Amino acid sequence: MSTMWTTRLRKATVEKFEPQDVLPDDQPSYVASWIYVFGVLTLASLFIIIGSGLWLTTKGAIWWHSSSVGHFVNSVHLWSVELFFVFMVVHLWGKFWMAAWRGRRFMTWVTGAFAFLASVATGFTGYLIQWDFDSQWIATQAKDGLNSAGIGSFFNTLNTGQAILLHVSLLPLVVGIIVVWHVILVRRNGVVPPLDAKEIAGGAM
Amino acid sequence: MSKERNVDLAKWSGPKRPYDLVKEFTIALLVVAVLVGGCALLFSSPDEPAITLQKWANSAPSDFVATTVGELAGTTISASYGPPYNNAGEGLSLGPIKPQKWAGVTIPVNPAVDFVVDPLKFSKDASVPAALSQWTSAPATQQTKWANDYASAIEKAGDYTKVATSDTYGPVPTMAAGLLTLAQSDVLDGLLTTTVTPYPSDFTKPMLFLADGGYFDELGAAQHLHGDQWGMMNETGSYPGQSWLWLFSLWYQVEPLKSSGNADIQIFALLILLNLGFIFMPKIPFINRLPRLIPFHRLIWRRYYQENNL
């Protein structure tokens, strides 16, 4: 095996994939259910969250309180988050009832679970930086739970400056990396076959 | 390895169908954009104005004064909180596990000094400097006695304006009145947030002070935001809020956690366990068999099972 780091990285990443696996134009015949749509709907919602979030970011933290356009963009951001979670939860339940972790797809499930939890944390910090009564109330209520676990010593919900930086920089990066990892695993391992599908595949490895 | 597991692992060798992923994503993006845009136009988003110390002092001066006296007496939530703000208590614990205490004081807050004494140094009330001098030169036991006596008198009278002047309370009435004036004139909000820089972004002190009073709590209750009203997963108005926090808020609604003094740490520990269960669900016996025992998959893949007579 090559000792070059570059070669090792290429073998561990790029060479693991065939072009047809990265962007396939066909799928197994069993991929024919509305449940499969919810994964891509979650991804589409995430794109709109990021787009509306970037718009709000470029205008500043309190722009949306004084501008009707800003208030609309804030509303888009809010409702895309709401739909994102609805789609993700349906996607998640669908994958549970399909036992989609079968066939070395355990990490696909795990990355999906972490994507959900990281999204909850990102959504929470978003609610903290509204600079209105809602953010004040949520910050004062949430601090007790976080303080009781020792987390409050490092993450202060009442420090809006800290929350806003976490929300627009670190946490979206974390969610983005986990989601990309999740999608790569789905593409690499393929869509899990139906339970009891042994007759069709013929046990081929 | 069983034949079934071979199938799960194998690259699918059965029939395939055309599937345009890029077109699917593009249509999904358009559909979500229309849905989101429609919801934004129809329902907008909540924006209840923030509460300032000035608004509190003007809307509920008696509550403001009572809370100020409580800070001086050391009887408010903040004054007896413990880490990460001060060492007035140990914080919550789960048996011998005390993460709140172990994490230590990283955001030092001394409510009597930070919320009352230090801001009063900027008061223009002529009687305040003498009151401050009397307070700071008195021993702690005397300070506590003055504040507690005045707090009891306010509670008995129902309002600080109905309490008769008395030397029993020392400088406390003058200090409380001075701080009320500072707050009503919009000076206190700035004093509590601009000690480091004139451009504030850390609202720890004013928010702890505000949350110590009854006024802020009543506003939250009126907006159905109390912990026993499913708390912070709600938003003001009729918006869905953070509905994904239901599993967190649920435990605050049920006994024995609902009335437990250590509910926050107990629920946090419970959520860690539940989330570990969520992450490692495929490895949990019985749970990982549920998809076979309750055959929703027959519905999901019904076309496949019909076509293959399975």
Image (tube, helix red, strand yellow):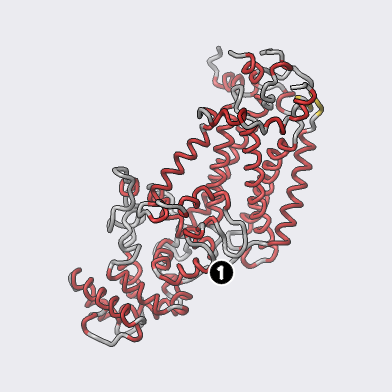
x, y percent for residue A121:
53, 47
- Quarter of the image with the N terminus of chain A is top right
A115 versus B42 height, above or below: above
> Crowdedness of circle 1 by 10 Å Cα count: few (<14), some, many (20+)?
few
**Number of on-image labels:** 1
The x and y percentages for residue B193 are 43, 65
Identify residue type, mark 1.
Pro
Residue at the (41%, 43%) spot, across then down = B269
Residue A168 visible in image: no
The C terminus of chain A appears in which quarter of the rendering? top right
Picture quadrant where residue B176 is located: bottom left
Question: Is residue A203 visible to us here?
Answer: yes
Q: Nearer the viewer, residue A182 or B110?
A: A182
Q: In x, y percent, where is residue B85?
A: 34, 57
Q: Residue at x 47, y 54 (%)?
A: B253
Q: Is residue A154 left or right of residue A104?
A: left
